[in-house]
Image (cartoon, grey):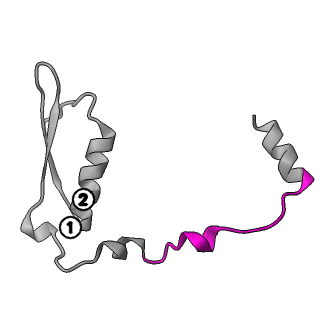
Amino acid sequence: MNEFKLNKIPLSDLIDQLIELYDSGANFVDIVGHNGENKDTIGILVRNEYVTYNRHPEDRYKGTDPEEDIQERPLTDEDLNQLLQNE
């Protein structure tokens, strides 16, 4: 297996593209890299066997209700002291 390094790939673009692919049903991708003179690039390939059709984008959030993780309670002196110590 040949290994090579791709430099300075913009994460926000990569993450946005991967989210879009996942929301479209992709479970897996093949990533191809190209070393260029001025910049390196990657290509993302999705094969038909990597896709689950008719999946709803909201399915990726099943079982992770952010409201369940929020605990409301008044701040105590100990909470405030911890916050001040962490600054």
Which residue is drawn at the image coordinates 84% and 63% (left, top)? 74
Depicted 87 relative to depicted 26: above or below: above
Depicted 17 relative to depicted 23: above or below: above
The spot of residue 7 in percent (x, y) is 25, 28
Dot 1: element: loop
Disc 2 + disc 1, Cβ < 8 Å: yes
Q: Which residue is mark 2?
A: 20
The N terminus lies in quadrant: top left
Which residue is drawn at the image coordinates 29% and 36% (left, top)? 10
The spot of residue 4 in percent (x, y) is 18, 31
- Asked which quadrant contains residue 87, the reply is top right
Q: How many marks can you see?
A: 2
Residue 79 versus residue 27: which sits nearer the camera?
79
Q: What's the amino acid at mark 1?
A: Ser
- Seen in the image, is 60 located left or right of residue 86? left
Residue 9 versus residue 70: which sits nearer the camera?
70
Q: Residue furthest bottom?
A: 54
Which residue is drawn at the image coordinates 11% and 19% (left, top)? 37
The spot of residue 52 in percent (x, y) is 18, 75
Depicted 37 relative to depicted 40: above or below: above
Residue 3 versus residue 70: which sits nearer the camera?
70
Q: Dot 2: few (<14), some (14–19), or many (≥20) neighbours within 10 Å?
A: few
Depicted 66 relative to depicted 54: above or below: above
Q: Which mark is residue 60?
A: none
Whether 67 is among the magenta residues is yes
- CA separation, marks 2 and 1? 6 Å
Range of residues picked out in magenta? 62-77
Q: Which mark is residue 24?
A: 1
Which residue is drawn at the image coordinates 16% and 77% (left, top)? 53
Magenta-colored segment: predominant secondary structure: loop
Dot 2: element: helix
